[in-house]
Image (spheres, rainbow, N blue to C red):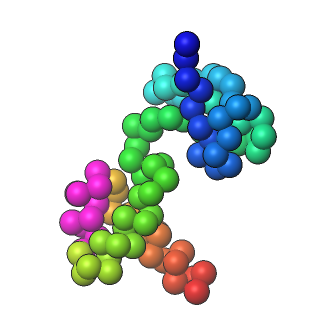
């Protein structure tokens, strides 16, 4: 018996179906409830759902963009873009 993944957006696991594969050959899924596609695993860590929360926490601790990028395995430009967008939203 295979366990269906839970949707990253609405949390539903009953209406999830396979929806092709990514360029990296990782299985993609489609949630029929909210009509969003997602993957269970990403090769780029910047797509993980909690990465922005981690960036905010590490910035509040006084860490530099470069050290955060190294620790999280993401590009420093992503951190700069997140900070810029956060400043615009406020």
Is 10 included in the stretch rendered in magenta? no
Left/right placement of residue 49 relative to residue 44 reads right
Q: Does the magenta stretch include residue 68?
A: yes
Q: Is residue 80 above or below residue 8?
A: below
Q: Which residue is drawn at 76% across and 45% down?
A: 34
Q: Where is residue 33 in the image (x, y as percent from the top left)?
A: 78, 40
Q: Give the range drawn in magenta.
A: 64-73
At 30% from the left and 72% from the top, the residue drawn is 58
Image point (45%, 49%), residue name: 48
Q: Is residue 66 left or right of residue 55?
A: left
Toward the front, the furthest residue is 1
For the C terminus, which image quadrant? bottom right
Q: Position of residue 56 (x, y in %)?
A: 39, 73
Compared across the picture, whether 2 is left or right of 19 comes to left
Q: Where is residue 5 in the image (x, y as percent from the top left)?
A: 57, 32
Does residue 19 appear in this view?
no
Check the image and name the residue furthest to the top: 1
Residue 63 is at least partly visible in this image:
yes
In the displayed structure, 8 sits above or below 24; it is below
Up the image or down, 9 lies above or below 79; here it is above
45 vs 58, left or right, is: right
Task: Decide whether the magenta segment is chiefly helix, strand or loop.
Answer: helix
For residue 44, what is the image quadrant? Answer: top left
For residue 1, which quarter of the picture?
A: top right
Count of numbered badges drawn on the protein: 0
Question: Horizontal and vertical percent for residue 64?
Answer: 24, 74
| Foreground of the two, 14 or 30 | 14
What residue is drawn where x is 68% and y is 49%? 10
């Amino acid at each position: 018996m295979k366990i269906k993944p839970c949707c990253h957006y609405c949390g539903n696991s009953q209406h999830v179906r396979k929806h092709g594969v990514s360029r990296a050959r990782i299985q993609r899924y489609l949630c029929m409830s909210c009509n969003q596609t997602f993957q269970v695993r990403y090769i780029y860590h910047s797509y993980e759902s909690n990465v922005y929360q981690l960036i905010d926490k590490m910035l509040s601790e006084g860490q530099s963009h470069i050290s955060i990028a190294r620790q999280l395995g993401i590009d420093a430009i992503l951190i700069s873009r997140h900070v810029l967008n956060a400043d615009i939203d406020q």
